[in-house]
Image: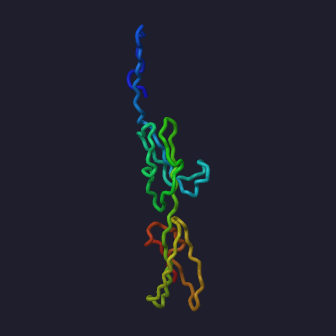
Amino acid sequence: ELDGADSQTITIGAGENTIIFYYTIRKDLELTVNHYDIADKDKSAEDRVPLIQPTHSKNQVFGSIPNILALVEPIEGYEYVSSDPASVTIGTGENVVNLFYQRQKYNYTVHHHYEEDPTWDVSVPHEALFGEQVTYTERPMQNYTLDYVTGSPLTVSTEENLNNIHVY
């Protein structure tokens, strides 16, 4: 960006003629950051569903290389994996970086209760991806019949203390 007047009149003389232009680096550029599930990485940009709305980092300096890790947003149930491109140099055109996250695994527990004996409780731990829906499937047990199930289907959340299925 030219710093100073838009135009100036100069007179060229017989001696040495030197014109000096002073420019300032642009600091008004923007970087758009898209946040996607790693499962969508091979899809076209139009087919990818963002995990959160794109973020816009304003006042970027021309020629600068932003720290990709500083652009990572905390997204419940996901962890950052990679970016595309791996780095970006801020230019005057469209500056875009795609960040990819993967779903994390969380524990859930299936509690087997026997109503005739409240001290009898068998808890079986399991693991599933965030947001995954788990449905209890009856497994016949000798001398027992299934009465009812609560908490099934279960959508696995980040709060593991809430990830419970109870079988009576």
Which residue is pictured at 49% across the width and 73% down the height?
Answer: 108
Left or right: residue 88 versus residue 45 is left
Q: Is residue 58 left or right of residue 150?
A: left
Q: How many marks?
A: 0
Q: Identify which residue is drawn at 56% across, 53% down.
A: 49
Q: On the picture, is 47 further left or further right than 15?
A: right
Residue 89, x across and y down, in percent:
48, 41
Instruction: Name the residue nearer the viewer: 92 or 124.
Output: 92
State the residue at coordinates (44%, 45%). 66
Task: Compare residues 143 and 109 and report the one nearer the observer.
Answer: 109
Measured as percent of width and height from the top left, residue 110 is found at 51, 78
Relative image position of residue 134 (x, y in whole percent): 55, 71
The x, y position of residue 116, in whole percent, is 48, 90
Quarter holding the N terminus is top left
Q: How is the image coloured?
A: rainbow
Q: Is residue 55 above or below residue 39?
A: above
In the displayed structure, 57 sits above or below 102; it is above
Q: Residue furthest left?
A: 4
